[in-house]
Image: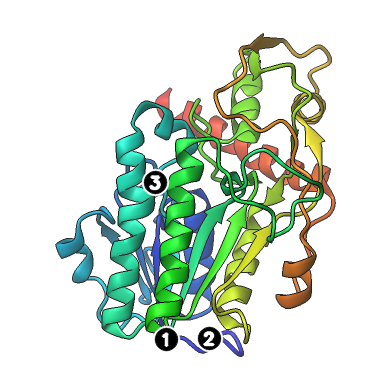
C-alpha cells in the first residue's frame, strides 16, 4: 500500500465511469481493498476489465438511490470517494431523476457513512454550482447561484455533505470539478466535449459547436483529478473544506476544435454551429490557489500533451472497436 495512505477499504461510487475507473485503478494498484459501485447507466464494465485479476478489487452493480442494496456494501469501508452523478446532459431531460441521484443518492451515502463509522468522505462536486460568474477568477468564496438543474442538485449534495460534517462530525471534503478530460471519457453525444470531437473527427464526421465557440473552459486532466481525490482523503485539515479542482488552463471551444483537428492531421475540419445550450456558462476563469496550497496539487499544465494522451487512446479504442465488429 502507498505510504501514508491510512485507509484499508475504499468504496468508489461511479467506479465504472470515466473518472471513477481511473480512481479505482489507482487505489487497487496502491493495494487498497476497493469496491466499485455503479448502476451502469453510464459506466462500462470494460473500464474495469483490466482489474479483474486483482484480489483487492470488487465490482458491484448498485444504484445509489437504492438504500437497502447500498447498505450491504458498506461493511468494513473506511473511506468513500463519491464520484457517481447524474450528468448535466441528462438533467435537462429528466430533472427529477437528476435530483434523486445527485441529492438523494448523496444523502444515502452520507447516512451510511455516518452509521458505519466511515473515517473520510470525499465528495465530487462541480463548478456548475457557481452559475454565472460575478467576478474573476472564481474562488471558493464566490456566490453559489447555479443556472441549471444539474448545478442545483449538485449544490444540494454539497450542502448535505457539509451538514453531516457539522452535525455528526463526519470528515467530508468537497472537490468542484471543471471539464475533466482524458482516456475512457464517454464519447457519445452525452459525453465530454474532447472525446466527442475526437470520435466524430476519427469517424470522418463534422462536429457541432453550440453557440459561437468563444465560450471558455478550464480543462483538467483526469490523472490530476485522481491525485486530488487521494490528497483530499489523506491531508490533515480538510474536514468541511471545498476546493476548486481545476488546472487553471483556459481554452475556447473553437480553439479546442482546431487543436483536436491538428493532432489528427485534419487540415480543414468540418464544423457546424448550433443554438446555445440552456444554462451554458460562457466563461470559466478559476482560482485554484487553495487546492495548490492545501493539497499541494501540481496540475498538468501542458494541455496539448494531455490532449495527445487522450486522442491517442481514442484512436486505439475506435480502431479496436472497428476490428472487433469486422
x 37%, y 82%: residue: 168
Q: Which mark, residue 1?
A: 2
Q: Horizontal placement of 184 versus 284: left or right?
A: left
Q: Quadrant of the C terminus?
A: top left
Q: Horizontal placement of 67 versus 247: left or right?
A: left
Going from N to C along the chain, the mark reached first, 2 or 3, is: 2
Q: Which mark, residue 276?
A: none
User: Residue 256: horizontal and vertical position, in percent?
Assistant: 77, 30
What color scheme is it?
Answer: rainbow
Inspect this view and state whether residue 51 appears. Answer: no
Helix, strand or loop at mark 2 = loop
> How packed is label 1: few (under 14 Cα within 10 Å), some, or many (20 or more)?
some
Count of numbered tags: 3
Q: Which residue is mark 1?
A: 8
> How packed is label 3: few (under 14 Cα within 10 Å), some, or many (20 or more)?
many
| Distance CA(mark 2)–CA(mark 1) | 9 Å
> How packed is label 2: few (under 14 Cα within 10 Å), some, or many (20 or more)?
some
x 37%, y 26%: residue: 93
Q: Is residue 251 above or below residue 121?
A: above
Q: Which residue is mark 3?
A: 43
x 28%, y 56%: residue: 64
User: Residue 300: horizontal and vertical position, in percent?
Assistant: 79, 57
Q: Nearer the viewer, mark 2 or mark 3?
A: 3
| Distance CA(mark 2)–CA(mark 3) | 26 Å
The answer to whether marks 2 and 1 mark residues whose Cβ atoms lie closer than 8 Å is no
Q: Nearer the viewer, residue 210 or 259?
A: 210
The answer to whether marks 2 and 3 mark residues whose Cβ atoms lie closer than 8 Å is no
Going from N to C along the chain, the mark reached first, 2 or 1, is: 2
User: Residue 152: horizontal and vertical position, in percent?
Assistant: 47, 44
| Distance CA(mark 3)–CA(mark 1) | 25 Å
Q: Is residue 311 above or below residue 140?
A: above
Q: Nearer the viewer, residue 262 or 106?
A: 106
Amino acid at each position: 500500500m502507498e505510504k501514508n495512505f491510512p485507509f484499508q477499504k475504499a468504496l468508489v461510487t461511479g467506479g465504472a465511469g470515466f473518472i471513477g475507473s481511473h480512481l479505482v485503478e489507482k487505489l487497487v494498484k496502491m493495494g487498497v481493498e476497493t469496491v466499485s459501485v455503479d448502476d451502469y447507466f453510464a459506466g462500462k464494465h470494460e473500464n474495469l476489465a483490466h482489474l479483474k485479476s486483482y484480489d483487492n478489487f470488487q465490482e458491484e452493480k448498485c444504484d445509489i438511490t437504492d438504500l437497502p442494496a447500498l447498505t450491504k456494501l458498506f461493511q468494513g469501508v473506511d473511506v468513500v470517494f463519491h464520484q457517481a452523478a447524474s450528468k448535466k446532459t441528462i438533467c435537462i431531460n429528466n430533472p427529477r431523476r437528476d435530483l434523486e441521484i445527485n441529492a438523494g443518492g448523496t444523502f444515502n451515502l452520507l447516512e451510511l457513512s455516518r452509521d458505519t463509522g466511515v473515517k473520510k468522505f470525499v465528495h465530487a462536486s462541480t463548478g456548475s454550482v457557481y452559475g454565472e460568474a460575478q467576478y474573476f477568477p472564481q474562488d471558493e468564496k464566490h456566490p453559489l447561484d447555479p443556472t441549471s438543474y444539474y448545478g442545483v442538485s449538485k449544490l444540494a449534495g454539497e450542502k448535505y455533505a457539509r451538514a453531516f460534517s457539522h452535525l455528526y462530525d463526519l470528515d467530508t471534503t468537497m472537490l468542484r470539478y471543471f471539464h475533466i478530460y482524458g482516456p475512457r471519457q464517454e464519447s457519445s453525444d452525452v459525453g465530454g466535449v474532447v472525446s466527442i470531437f475526437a470520435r466524430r473527427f476519427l469517424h470522418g464526421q463534422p462536429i457541432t459547436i453550440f453557440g459561437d465557440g468563444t465560450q471558455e473552459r478550464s480543462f483538467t486532466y483526469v490523472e490530476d483529478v485522481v491525485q486530488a481525490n487521494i490528497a483530499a482523503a489523506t491531508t490533515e485539515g480538510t474536514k468541511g473544506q471545498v476546493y476548486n479542482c481545476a488546472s487553471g488552463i483556459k481554452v475556447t471551444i473553437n480553439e479546442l476544435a482546431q487543436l483536436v483537428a491538428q493532432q489528427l492531421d485534419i487540415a480543414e475540419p468540418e464544423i457546424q454551429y448550433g443554438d446555445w445550450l440552456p444554462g451554458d456558462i460562457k466563461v470559466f476563469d478559476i482560482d485554484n490557489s487553495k487546492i495548490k496550497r492545501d493539497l499541494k496539487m501540481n496540475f498538468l499544465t501542458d494541455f496539448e500533451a494531455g490532449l495527445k494522451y487522450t486522442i491517442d487512446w481514442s484512436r486505439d479504442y475506435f480502431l479496436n472497436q472497428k476490428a472487433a465488429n469486422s
